[in-house]
Image: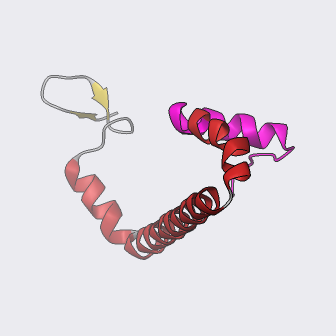
Amino acid sequence: MGTSGQGLEIPRYLLPTPTTIASYIFVKFQLLASHTLMTLLEAGIGFIVGSLSAIVTAVLFLWFRPLKEMFYPYAVILNSTRSLPSLHRLSSSLGVEWVPKS
């Protein structure tokens, strides 16, 4: 079994050499490019949806004072806590299951 690094006994499957990584990127470029494009597309769509929902919520809070008085404390709480644990708790309470895509 070969090792990577100078003097370090790190197996190659754990830390491949830069040339191995570069050759893998070259061979699998089409696959990596398509996955990168899909990830960027999903991130962009998520950013747009999140921004639009924030703008709509802000306008609704501005126009309808009772709505603001009812939901503003929850908006502050959600904004002050970490987002992923809050989302997990919220989705779990709504009965939404988080499953991997593959």
Q: Residue shown at 68%/59% (left/top)?
A: 64
Q: Please name the residue shown 51% across and 69% down the image.
A: 48
Q: Is residue 80 above or below residue 43?
A: above
Q: Position of residue 38 (x, y in %)?
A: 51, 71
- Image-quadrant location for residue 59: bottom right
Observer-nearest residue: 63 or 45? Answer: 63
Task: Please give the range of residues in magenta.
Answer: 78-102
Q: Is residue 101 magenta?
A: yes
Q: Quadrant of the C terminus?
A: bottom right
Residue at the far right in the pictured view: 95
The residue most toward the left is 6
Along the viewing direction, whichever of 8 and 77 lies nearer the viewer:
77
**Place of residue 76 in the rendered image (x, y in percent of width and height, measured from the top left):** 57, 37
Image position of 97 with respect to 4: above or below: below
Q: Whole-percent x and y of residue 79? A: 53, 39
Q: Residue at x 66, y 41 (%)?
A: 87
Task: Provide residue 81's location: percent of width, then percent of height.
Answer: 55, 30
Q: Locate the N terminus and report the quarter of the image it occupies.
A: top left
- Check if residue 28 falls in the magenta segment: no
Q: Is residue 34 left or right of residue 27?
A: right
Whether 45 is drawn above or below 91: the answer is: below
Residue at horizontal 83 percent and vertical 37 percent from the top:
93
Dividing the picture into quadrants, the one containing residue 73 is top right
In the figure, is residue 26 to the left or right of 73?
left
